[in-house]
Image (tube, grey):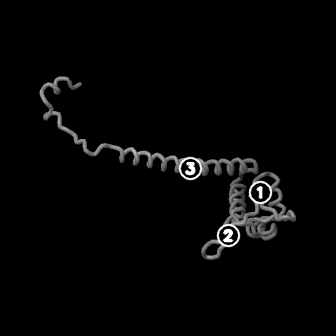
């Protein structure tokens, strides 16, 4: 994650991706030691934004990620397992979004097809067909 310039929301609250917390505050919010954040970054579990001076800045999304990592490690999963789980969750989220997009496109295609149907055609019951047509029916 990189330092974002996301504008504040309508009610003035900062976006969850806006990197505002220094490492000590982020560590306190997540309930871990600052060195733990550095380890997580080194292991590829976190990618905090950095200022022009190279200082790490963490967003609300980063803090939520830290809490998720803490939950997984508390459940006995090692850091490599956590990394894989987080990658799979990200992939699942991406695939779910793609599935939603494809379903929406399919619905629109069905609606367009239905609009092309000829409305002047009406079904005819088979007992009303001429006798010569009824014998050729399969």
Distance from label 3 to label 1 (Cα)?
23 Å
The answer to whether the residue labelled 1 contacts the one labelled 2, judged by CB atoms less than 8 Å apart, is no
How far apart are the two marked residues, 1 and 2, measured between alpha carbons?
21 Å
Q: Is residue 111 above or below residue 10?
A: above
Asked whether the beta carbons under mark 2 and mark 3 sit within 8 Å of each other, the answer is: no
The numbered mark, 2 or 3, whose residue comes first in the sequence reads: 2
Q: Quadrant of the C terminus?
A: top left
Location of the N terminus by quadrant is bottom right
Between tags 2 and 3, which lies in front?
2
Q: Quadrant of residue 72?
A: bottom right
- 13 vs 110, left or right, is right
Q: What residue sits right under mark 1 in the picture?
A: 47
Label 2 SS:
loop
**Residue identifier under label 2:** 7
Mark 1 or 2: in front is 2
Residue at the image position 80 percent from the left and 56 percent from the top: 41
């Amino acid at each position: 994650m990189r330092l974002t310039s996301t504008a504040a929301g309508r009610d003035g609250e900062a976006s969850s991706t806006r990197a505002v917390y220094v490492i000590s505050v982020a560590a306190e919010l997540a309930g871990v030691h600052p060195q733990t954040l550095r380890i997580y970054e080194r292991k590829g579990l976190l990618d905090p934004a950095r200022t022009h001076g190279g200082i790490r800045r963490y967003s609300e999304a980063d803090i939520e990620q830290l809490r998720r990592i803490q939950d997984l490690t508390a459940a006995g999963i090692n850091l490599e397992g956590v990394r894989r789980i987080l990658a799979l969750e990200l992939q699942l989220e991406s695939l779910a979004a793609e599935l939603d997009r494809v379903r929406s496109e399919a619905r629109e295609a069905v609606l367009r097809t239905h609009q092309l149907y000829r409305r002047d055609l009406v079904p005819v019951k088979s007992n009303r067909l001429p006798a010569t047509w009824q014998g050729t029916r399969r």
